[in-house]
Image (cartoon, grey):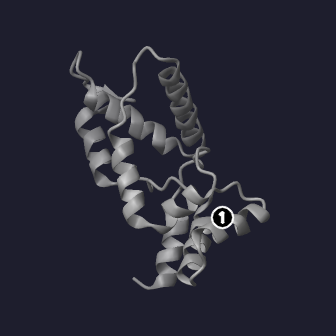
Amino acid sequence: MSESLFNKAWQLVKMPARDVRYKVTADDVARIQELSQQGMSQAAIARLLQDEGLPVSTGIVHYWVNEDSRNKQRLKNAKRTYDPNSEENQRRIERDQEKRRKNWAEDSDMQLRHDIQSAIDEKRVKRQSVRGMSMADAEKLLDSGKLQRPNSKI
């Protein structure tokens, strides 16, 4: 597929709502990586972007420039556990629910995907239908990829 055809097809895909936890956009990340490839130090990149009004630290620049560091941080985050009774966990749940609601407002297919996956994962009773469609039809729709969205955080 040619580059321009790919870009046109990609633009037709509905993107999830922007994740408010990220301070930089995909364009910012591309610029950070480009400046680094041109030989600029990570501290200098951070200062430049701060001068332009972007709230970045040297840690953020390092995360996006150094792939090994990014992979290590992702592994570390994946191992993180939360005390179910903690205030931090409650804030995390509320934040995730708000993000889910924003995604559903952006694209109703996201809510349908969530409903189907929830029905599949149901352990208390075997579900027979989801939103009026049989479980078999719902699973076919989920497996078809029509309800897939990019998992890009920024």
Quadrant (top left/top right/bottom left/bottom right) for the C terminus? bottom right
Q: Residue at x 40, y 26 (%)?
A: 82
Q: Is 12 placed above or below 132 here?
A: below
Q: Hey, which quadrant is residue 45 in on the image?
A: bottom right
**What amino acid is at disc 1?**
Ala
As drawn, is 56 to the left or to the right of 81? Answer: right
Q: Classify mark 1: helix, strand or loop.
A: helix
Report the front residue among 130 and 5. 5
Image coordinates for residue 46, horizontal then vertical, percent? 66, 64
Image coordinates for residue 23, horizontal then vertical, percent? 63, 52
As drawn, is 54 to the left or to the right of 132? Answer: right
Report the front residue among 7 and 129. 7
How crowded is the residue under tag 1: few (<14 C-alpha within 10 Å), some, or many (20+)? many
- Numbered label tally: 1
Q: Hey, which quadrant is residue 128 in on the image?
A: top left
As drawn, is 136 to the left or to the right of 145? Answer: left
As drawn, is 47 to the left or to the right of 88? Answer: right
Image coordinates for residue 144, horizontal then vertical, percent? 30, 53
Q: Is 140 placed above or below 111 here?
A: below
Report the front residue among 102 and 18. 18
User: Where does label 1 land, which residue?
Assistant: 46
Q: Residue at x 51, y 33 (%)?
A: 96
Q: Is residue 146 visible?
A: no
Q: Is 74 placed above or below 125 here?
A: below
Image coordinates for residue 32, horizontal then vertical, percent? 59, 70
